[in-house]
Image: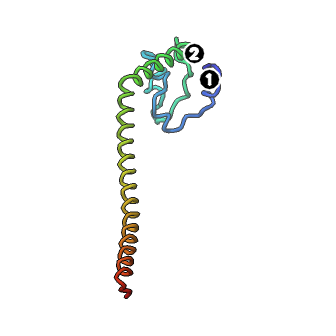
């Protein structure tokens, strides 16, 4: 699975913003000054050639295990604290949406009733005038 992505990773040139973030090989090589962040840049601030994508002693299987552990932690989070957070945000969004709908419906009903009541009053007055014979 990871072997297919490795050639793609080698072709991607890091942007300036990405260079500011330490790569995995810089973090996973404790005690190896050749891989440390300070030796990755020279005195002029220019970056030395990129180190190998593989940290010493790590393999693609290790990356798979790391990804699996990360997946497990994410699943645990989403089953517990993450679920509560998602539920809270969904409930807030649902309440906000319901309030907007109530406001919109109330406005439309009010407008329609104003028009309808005006028509009913007009028709009632016309009928009363016709009954009394007063046709001003």
**Residue 126 appears left or right of 68:** left
x and y, in percent, of residue 64 in the image: 54, 16
Residue with the most extreme top position: 57
Q: Image check: 13 left or right of 37?
A: right
- Which residue is rendered at x = 35% and y = 34% of the image? 88
Tally of numbered tags? 2
Tell me the element at label 1.
Answer: helix
- In the image, 55 versus 69, the foreground residue is 69
**Quadrant placement of the N terminus:** top right
Residue placed under numbered mark 1 in the picture = 6
Label 2: how many residues lie within 10 Å, few (<14), some (14-19) or many (20+)?
few
Residue drawn at 44 percent across, 26 percent down: 37
Find numbered disc 2 in the image and state the secondary structure of the residue it sits on. helix
Q: How crowded is the residue under tag 1: few (<14 C-alpha within 10 Å), some, or many (20+)?
A: few
Q: Is residue 117 left or right of residue 3?
A: left
Rendered image quadrant of residue 75: top left
Answer with mark 2 or mark 1, whichever residue precedes in sequence: 1
Residue 121 image position (x, y, % from top left): 35, 72
Q: Which mark is residue 60?
A: 2
Q: Nearer the viewer, residue 24 or 92?
A: 92
User: Percent x, y for residue 30?
Assistant: 43, 16
Q: Are marks 2 and 1 in contact (CB under 8 Å)?
A: yes
Spatial CA span between label 2 and label 1: 9 Å
Q: Nearer the viewer, residue 3 or 133?
A: 133
Q: Give the vertical position of 113 relative to 91 (above or below).
A: below
């Amino acid at each position: 699975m990871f072997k297919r992505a490795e050639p793609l990773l080698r072709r991607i040139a890091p942007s300036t913003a990405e260079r500011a973030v330490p790569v995995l090989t810089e973090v996973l090589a404790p005690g190896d000054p050749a891989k440390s962040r300070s030796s990755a840049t020279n005195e002029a601030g220019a970056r030395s050639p990129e180190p190998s994508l593989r940290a010493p002693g790590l393999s693609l299987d290790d990356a798979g295990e790391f990804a699996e552990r990360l997946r497990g932690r994410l699943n645990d989070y989403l089953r517990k604290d993450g679920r509560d957070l998602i539920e809270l945000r969904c409930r807030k969004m649902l309440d906000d949406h319901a309030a907007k709908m109530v406001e919109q419906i109330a406005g439309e009903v009010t407008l329609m009733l104003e028009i309808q009541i005006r028509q009913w009053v007009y028709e009632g007055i016309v009928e009363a005038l016709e009954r009394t014979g007063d046709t001003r």
